[in-house]
Image (cartoon, rainbow, N blue to C red):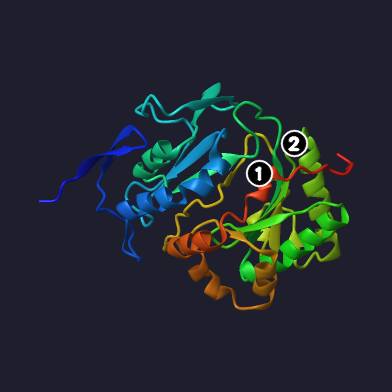
Amino acid sequence: MRRRSIVVAVDGRELELTNLEKVLYPQAGFTKAEVIDYYRRVADVMLPHLRGRPVTLKRWPDGVEAPSFFEKQCPRHRPPWVPVAPVSSSGKRPVVEYCRIEDLPALIWVANLAALELHVTLGTATAPETPLAAVFDLDPGPPAGLRECAVTALRIRQALEACGLQAFAKASGKSGLHVYVPINAPVTFDQTRALARSIARKLEAETPRAITTVMRKELRTGKVFIDWSQNHARKTTVAVYSLRGTPEPRVSAPLRWEEVEELAQGDPRKWSERLRAERVLERLEREGDLFAPVLELRQELPATEQ
């Protein structure tokens, strides 16, 4: 008879891991043990992008073909060594205590909760109103897809370069792309939101049949929705290297701009394979963290009408 739980030591912390044989990605036969192993192997590059941030968990306790739920409030049964980030809220709780994932034991602990997706704010727990980056979230309305998102991302990059800013791309792990603008300097969300809104609306005005800045889904058909409103202290974006709750274990992974150019011209169907967890791990071994500059590059935002 299989054991349903085991106790392991991770960097001096004792963890009970449960139901390791449970298949969380049925189409791929990918088990909870493999989810935990993925996060163990990706930890060195992922943790710098999580540390100090309030983390929202998205959990699939019975696998990706069953219901999921978001969990902002860090579970009460958390170990005492998992710190929390108290953040004021306009919801039912005046203060939400988000989990903080500071080290490998904490990352393994949330993986054991079947928290396949980890979502983070653009600010930190100690400075929630100060964004470290600006983000453009590109979401295609069918029949538009990943190729159209790539075309849009390249146009955003060009607009940012005209402002003297570097940007970095990552796949959402689903159907879209994210474009990040590192800042790492004292700015406000009003400033980052104004920059993203200005560029998004400029591109929308130039090609209204291809791009929209309107959130309503019925107006997105065949267009790429540029969500500039993600630049807000309380909003989150899926963390780089997070798994996604997709039929197969795909990852929100960084892309080189040359790859975005290739994607804009080629067949997007092969990209699902490139984003599988094992392929992302193989690439990390070869190339390291392509998203590291987002944590380090300091840039000054241009003056933008707010």
Please state the horizontal and vertical placement of residue 209, each as a whole percent of the image.
77, 68
Which residue is depicted at the point 89% across and 41% down? 303
Could you classify mark 1 by the number of other residues whose Cα lies within 10 Å: few (under 14), some (14-19), or many (20 or more)?
some
> Label 2, label 1: how many angstroms apart (C-alpha)?
17 Å
Please state the horizontal and vertical placement of residue 295, each as a whole percent of the image.
66, 44
- Does residue 92 appear anywhere in the picture? no
Specify whether 206 is left or right of 273. right
- Label 1 sits on a secondary structure element that is helix
Please state the horizontal and vertical placement of residue 137, each as a whole percent of the image.
66, 53
Q: Quadrant of residue 223?
A: bottom right
Query: Where 155 sits versus 97, above or below?
Result: below
- Label 2 sits on a secondary structure element that is helix
Query: Where 272 sits versus 252, above or below?
Result: below
Q: Which mark is residue 189?
A: 2
Q: Quadrant of residue 145?
A: bottom right
Please state the horizontal and vertical placement of residue 224, each as a whole percent of the image.
69, 62
Residue under pointer 1: 295
